[in-house]
Image (cartoon, rainbow, N blue to C red):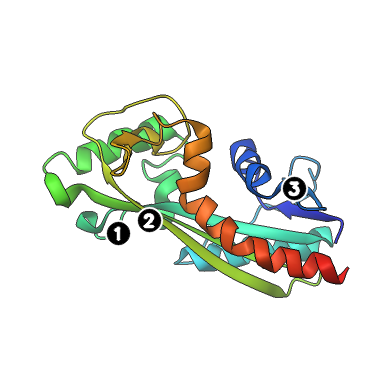
């Protein structure tokens, strides 16, 4: 195992992963060096399903180890929305501003504990044959603010308050977020699995 590809074209996700796993003796990259990589349709009805699709399809296509990751924000008072549709909640994939605007509108009538929410990240590791080798899930509990706070992070970070700090992910320093985030929790679980695999190579 010389290289692990993160099945994403989001440089911020890759940056987070390198910050957490960059000390391991393996090269991490995203899909940027692979323009021929297929676009994996996120048609599953769960984070696990979408992460598995990304990992297995890309691993087979690229003939390398791949981490497929799917993540999003869940608000119990909205029936779990935005959920798996987090990136395209307002209709256009990756339009953070529109997604945040819609979330604020949908939650305008909610107060106190009704504004509870959690981020979830599911990561799936697949080998070059497309076999699933590991599945991990991380969560981060919080509350949704009534207005944007801070300019850091991406997605719903300016709205997601971490109660222990009283600040949103948009306000917290990146180093703090990288220790607390749902993706960090998932990757921390993935680390010992990767260490075992690397020790065998």
Which of the labelled discs sits on residue 23, or is there none? 3
N-terminal of the pair, mark 3 or mark 1, is: 3
Residues at discs 1 and 2 in contact (Cβ within 8 Å): yes
Category of crowding for the residue at label 2, using alpha-carbon neighbours closer than 10 angstroms: few (below 14), some (14–19), many (at least 20): many
Q: Secondary structure at mark 1?
A: loop
**Residue 181: image x %, image y %?**
46, 48
**Residue 187: image x %, image y %?**
59, 56
Q: Which residue is mark 2?
A: 83
**Residue 23: image x %, image y %?**
74, 47
Residue sitting farthest toward the top: 151
**Residue 91: image x %, image y %?**
40, 42
Whether residue 56 is visible, yes or no, is: no
Residues at discs 3 and 1 in contact (Cβ within 8 Å): no
Category of crowding for the residue at label 1, using alpha-carbon neighbours closer than 10 angstroms: few (below 14), some (14–19), many (at least 20): few
Q: Nearer the viewer, residue 177 or 74?
A: 177
N-terminal of the pair, mark 2 or mark 3, is: 3
Q: In 3D space, how far apart are the residues under numbered discs 1 and 2 (Cα atoms)?
A: 6 Å
């Amino acid at each position: 195992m010389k290289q692990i590809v993160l099945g994403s074209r989001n440089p911020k996700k890759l940056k987070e992963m390198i910050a957490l796993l960059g000390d391991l003796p393996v090269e991490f990259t995203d899909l940027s060096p692979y323009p021929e990589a297929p676009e994996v349709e996120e048609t599953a009805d769960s984070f696990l399903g979408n992460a598995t699709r990304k990992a297995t399809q890309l691993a087979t296509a690229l003939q390398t180890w791949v981490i497929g990751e799917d993540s999003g924000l869940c608000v119990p008072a909205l029936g779990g929305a935005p959920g798996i549709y987090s990136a395209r909640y307002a209709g256009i994939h990756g339009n953070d501003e529109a997604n945040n605007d819609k979330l604020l509108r949908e939650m305008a009538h909610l107060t106190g504990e009704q504004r509870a929410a959690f981020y979830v990240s599911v990561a799936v590791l697949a080998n070059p044959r497309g076999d699933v080798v590991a599945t991990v899930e991380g969560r981060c509990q919080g509350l949704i603010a009534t207005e944007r706070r801070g300019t850091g992070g991406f997605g719903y970070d300016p709205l997601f308050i971490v109660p222990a700090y009283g600040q949103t992910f948009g306000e917290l320093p990146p180093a703090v977020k990288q220790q607390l985030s749902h993706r960090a929790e998932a990757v921390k679980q993935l680390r010992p699995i990767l260490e075992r695999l690397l020790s065998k190579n």
